Image: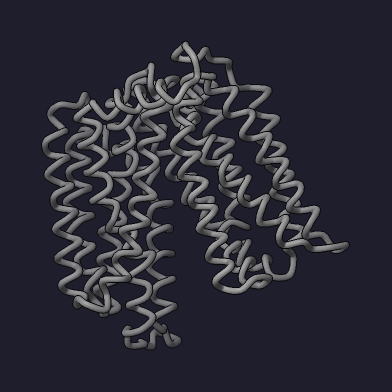
Amino acid sequence: MLSQLRSLNVNVRVRLLTSFLARFFGNMVYPFMSIYLTLYFSDQTAGMMLLIITSATIVMGFLSGYLADIIGKKKIIIWAQLCQTSALAVMALFNSPLFIIPSVTFMMMLLQNTTIALLNPAAEAMIIDDSTPKNRSFIYAIDYWAMNLSIMFGSMIGGLFFNEYRFELFTLQALSSLVVLYIMVRYLADDAPSLTGKNSVKQLRLMYGKVLQNRQFVIYCVAQLLVMSLDAQVINYVSVRLAKSFQAVVLGHEITGIQMAGLIRTENTLIVVLLTLVVPTLTKMLGEKRSFLLGLVMYIPAFFFIISSNNFYTLVSAVFVASIGEVFIIPLGKTMLAELSTQDLRGTYMALNGFIYRGTALLGALGVMLASTFSPYQLACFWGGLASIGFGCYLYLLPKIKLN
């Protein structure tokens, strides 16, 4: 594996390293910022602030791909990281032992989140530009493994220290962001803009219109949205349902519904971390298309039981099966995306693809809203039916995509 990593393009290696560092230190802080806002503002005000941040990231996500294709990916990445580092430094300063000003913290959160939305499509497009069809499955498997590892350990550290050592965590995150900025400036290779011309609303519209004319890409986005909406139900509906209706079980100590919700997320993360590095070998043996289909066949049915069941052993078993399926479909799904995007508009493709994750969040919220009207079994059928439509979209696409 080390020899494979060393053989990768320097831009890809830089992205993998900086992405891990940003996620690791970020997860010490990000998951707890909504709690931070509710400490200093009313629940309604805090909710409005989060809505403002989400809306701003959607707007920036829409512009980011266009800017990356017009200005150049490295320039966008460097400027976005510089703004993010500055925002984190100010956030640390205004949460120091000398004084705490939550309103400034919110403004820096807004700046930080919008710059992340600016940076990510350019960075993802750069990975595709500087990789090959032969090594993309390996690259995305490593990236997915590193992401889950950073979430697991970063969130664990943040959970232990965020309440009492907030200033230290903010400072640590700012310093890590500065290190990431240095690595990017020092080692990222320059790239030329993939498009030339005036920066205009008309050109923006033409670029997105051209991408949306790619029928296979649109079908891929629909498939991703419908299948990935299953995971959004765990974050939203399933957690709420378990907290309300799960009957506590005693296995050494009592496991309540809230603890069960945390347990299945922990189980998922552990399985992904342990198995992701094995998947490239299995994928090579089975072939990418067969591996992807195998993952879907495991992932979708397992969620029927995750959404509908309150039985401890059923839930643990279903999460185990779904997690194995996830390890196959997430990296290979990104490989499919790379094949469907064109080099001249790659940043635009990545920006549009980013809306899938915001769409799944909306479907997750919809799951909570439907809970008062439909039974868990009915909702499992509903979401499973939508995911099955996504499965059909993938079946349509696979013969048309260059995968092994």
- What x and y, as percent, mark residue 224? 27, 44
**At 44% across and 77% down in the image, what residue appears?**
259
Q: Could you tell me which quadrant the C terminus lies in?
A: top left
Q: Going by the image, does 83 lie left or right of 213?
A: right
Asked if residue 128 can be seen in this view, the reply is no
- What x and y, as percent, mark residue 150? 54, 50
Rendering colour mode: one colour
**Vertical order, 343 against 284 (above or below):** above
**Vertical order, 248 against 205 (above or below):** below
**Vertical order, 230 against 207 (above or below):** below
- What x and y, as percent, mark residue 44? 54, 71
**At 43% across and 58% down in the image, what residue appears?**
270
- What x and y, as percent, mark residue 8? 47, 23
Q: Going by the image, does 107 lie left or right of 265?
A: right
**At 39% across and 32% down in the image, what residue appears?**
350
Q: Could you tell me which quadrant the N terminus lies in?
A: top left
Q: Which quarter of the picture shows residue 310?
A: bottom left
Residue 107 versus residue 7: which sits nearer the camera?
107
